Amino acid sequence: MDRTGPDVDSLNTLRFTTERLLVDLPQPDDADVLFHLVGGPDRDAICATLAWDGPDDRSDTDWWIERCRTATYGEWGYHWVLRDRSGDLAGATGRALGAIGTRPTGVPGRGDVGYWLGRPYWSRGLVTEALTALVELGRTDLDYAKMEATVFATNPGGIRLVEKVGFEREGLIRRGHRKRGQWVDCALYGILL
Ligand SMILES: CC(C)(COP(=O)(O)OP(=O)(O)OC[C@H]1O[C@@H](n2cnc3c(N)ncnc32)[C@H](O)[C@@H]1OP(=O)(O)O)[C@@H](O)C(=O)NCCC(=O)NCCS
């Protein structure tokens, strides 16, 4: 497949829905909820398995939202907020639950994926739902030939999730990342589109 991925100079104008989620651009007024979810008491638990260490304060979340809205695909990738579509999950329709994104890898047509979900919403199949839809978007709107995920080998939930969605293991980078002063092996996963 001769696919080359999104135009590197484009802004993210895409949104999509799943059975329980609305997935669209972050808005400035999502900052309080997002910061509380990933920068509050659950920050260590959520960020333990991410390369990112989470926001230090509200202004970091404001900055992230602004970047998602104004930076091009080539500079920043495309990032979305996962929202409660019906209000049944978080008590309010449209409330932010987490985030998902895809970034260029340096090879046109290959994009990586990343995501986090607020802890109260774990283990309900929500990121399986979101990532399945993002892979479909990769196939249709993003013009990707391949999507990739780098998962800490110490993250069984992250590994089970990508395998469930259809990613295949391609290898292991020993000492792939240094997290909180410790080396972590990283499993590489990919799905051909
Ligand atoms: C990893 C994470 C994204 C999973 O999201 P989620 O919506 O809770 O995942 P799902 O409910 O869709 O679960 C997907 C599968 O993983 C399994 N799973 C989820 N968390 C797990 C855990 N901690 N240990 C083992 N399996 C787990 C689920 O049981 C499910 O498999 P099953 O259907 O066979 O039972 C979420 O826990 C999270 O945000 N963690 C912190 C950030 C992170 O690790 N991001 C990914 C970096 S690669």
Image (cartoon, rainbow, N blue to C red):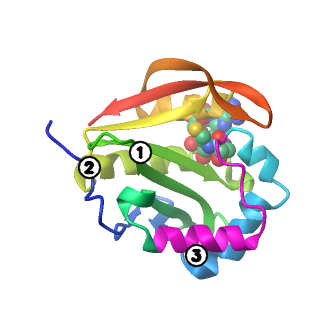
- Residue picked out by circle 2: 5
**Front disc: 1 or 3:** 1
Q: Residues within 10 Å of mark 3 (few under 14, many from 20)?
A: some
* Mark 2: C-beta under 8 Å from nearest atom of ligand 1: no
Query: Please, is residue 168 above or below residue 30 in the view?
Result: above
Q: How crowded is mark 2: few (under 14 residues within 10 Å), some or many (20 or more)?
A: many
Distance Cα–Cα, label 2 vs label 1: 18 Å
Closer to the chain start, of discs 3 and 2, is 2
Secondary structure, mark 2, is loop
* Residue 179 percent coordinates (x, y): 73, 35
Closer to the chain start, of discs 1 and 3, is 3
**105, 163: nearer the viewer:** 105
Secondary structure, mark 3, is loop
> Which dot marks residue 99?
none
Please give left or right for residue 14 compared with residue 175 in the image: left
> Which dot marks residue 93?
3
Closer to the chain start, of discs 2 and 1, is 2
- Residue picked out by circle 1: 132
Task: Check disc 1 and give the amino acid type.
Answer: Thr
Distance Cα–Cα, label 1 vs label 3: 22 Å
Magenta span of residues: 50-69
Is 64 in the magenta?
yes
